[in-house]
Amino acid sequence: MIEKRILILTSDTGGGHTSAAKALEAGFERFTDGVSYLTHIVKALEEFSSISRRLAALYNYLLRHKQQYVKYYHWLINKLSPDETSLFNRLFISYGKQLLDTYAPDAVVSVHPMMQCGFARFLSDAGLAAKVPFITVVTDPCGNSWKGWANKGVDLYTVARAEAAEELIRYGIPGNRIKLCGMPVHPKFQPVTETEAERLRVELGLAPDRFTVFVNSGWAGGGNIPQIFSELIKSDLDIQAVFLAGTNDKLLQRATRLAAQAPFPVKVIGFSDQMEKLMAAANVMISKLGGLTTFEALTCRLPIIADLITPPMPQERGAADLIAQNRAGILLRQASDIALCIRELSQNREEYLSMRAAAGSLSAPDATRRIVYEITELLNRSKTQGPPYHLRR
């Protein structure tokens, strides 16, 4: 069995990019025939320089503590384009050589908007652009996203929706390099039967037949979700809840204290790598509209109560419109409205089932398979067979 090596570039700026990387890793394990693919995931933004590491840390700090300022971070990065500077280019040369010497990839896949310029330029300068295909999987589904996604040195783009493709074309990317595939959701995210949902609730220590609310504060753990949770536990709703604190230990402790005051059962969890089980156990999810999280929930046919207390980041506005226009969830603009939203959903089964069906209609459950197919087809079409190769010194 032939073995090919795939290098995936990601970052822990939020949890979505790494979720996409792991989805692709699973896709290369499950959806290829006759060829064995060995994938390596590297957190490139954190690894390649202290400057990029600080930018990543700043982004996560804003997500957790100052969500209202993330839009200014987005504007500043798009305005200054630090990934296009000669400094970043010089830093990426040594990092790129290190990656290729270590992993000898047949193809490189980026799932992060800060990787395109540096890696494409490195491959070109090293004389490897024709030998190592460079693919970008865009994880902002609805456009209005980071300009860094677009670079003419990328051989293939996959996007979730037409809006993202149209934006890349406006930035100068040829349309024949763009494939509309859907979001790279891990194959473990699937709709479940009510019997399976009840079993998962029991695993969490909850009642099997009670309306279950998943309060998801995201990978960073913060934003407006703690405020929404505080309002939720003041209610007299006949529900139960799961609260996910992400990587924020202080929020975990605070949520545990709040949960003890709730008039209904609450399971508090820190970071979890079993999001598919939490979503499958829930009837509705309260969350910020991160691209991957949103489409993971839609794949599970899970209605979303979207946190719009703070206006969404530019790249998330389209997801909010998508949810609203298709009635796949509710846009929450005031924390104090959360009890009313949950009450209506839990007591109006027809409305709930309609939202669940709408959520499922927006998903593309075979997206990861399609993305893997497009990448493997590109590898098969490549004129040069890739490694072994030699870096220019």
Image (cartoon, rainbow, N blue to C red):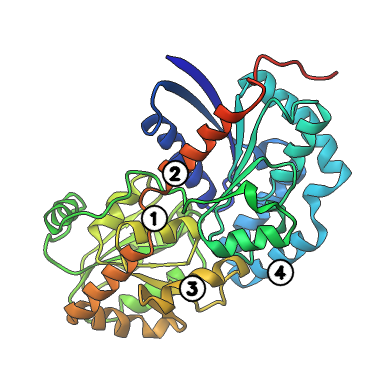
Q: Residue 72's mark?
A: 4
The image position of residue 209, as x and y in percent, is 11, 64
The image position of residue 13, as x and y in percent, is 59, 51
Task: Identify residue type, mark 2.
Answer: Arg
Q: Are marks 1 and 2 in contact (CB under 8 Å)?
A: yes
Name which of mark 4 and mark 1 comes first in the sequence: 4
Q: CA distance from mark 2 to mark 3?
A: 25 Å
Q: Which residue appears at 66% of the width and 69% of the height?
A: 71
Tell me the crowding category of disc 2: few under 14, some 14 to 19, or many 20 or more residues within 10 angstroms, Cα based: many
Which residue is label 1 attached to? 364
Dividing the picture into quadrants, the one containing residue 305 is bottom left
Q: Are marks 4 and 1 in contact (CB under 8 Å)?
A: no
Along the horizontal axis of the image, is 59 left or right of 20? right
Q: CA distance from mark 3 to mark 1?
A: 18 Å
Q: Residue 370's mark?
A: 2
Name which of mark 3 and mark 4 comes first in the sequence: 4
The image position of residue 6, as x and y in percent, is 55, 28
Task: Identify residue type, mark 3.
Answer: Ala
The image position of residue 282, as x and y in percent, is 25, 62
Q: Residue 320's mark?
A: 3
Q: Are marks 2 and 3 in contact (CB under 8 Å)?
A: no
Q: CA distance from mark 3 to mark 4?
A: 19 Å
Q: CA distance from mark 1 to mark 2?
A: 10 Å
92, above or below 181, in the image: above
Q: Which residue appears at 65% of the width and 62% of the height?
A: 167
Q: Secondary structure at mark 1?
A: loop
Q: Which residue appears at 41% of the width and 35% of the height?
A: 26
Along the horizontal axis of the image, is 271 left or right of 261? right
Q: Secondary structure at mark 4?
A: helix
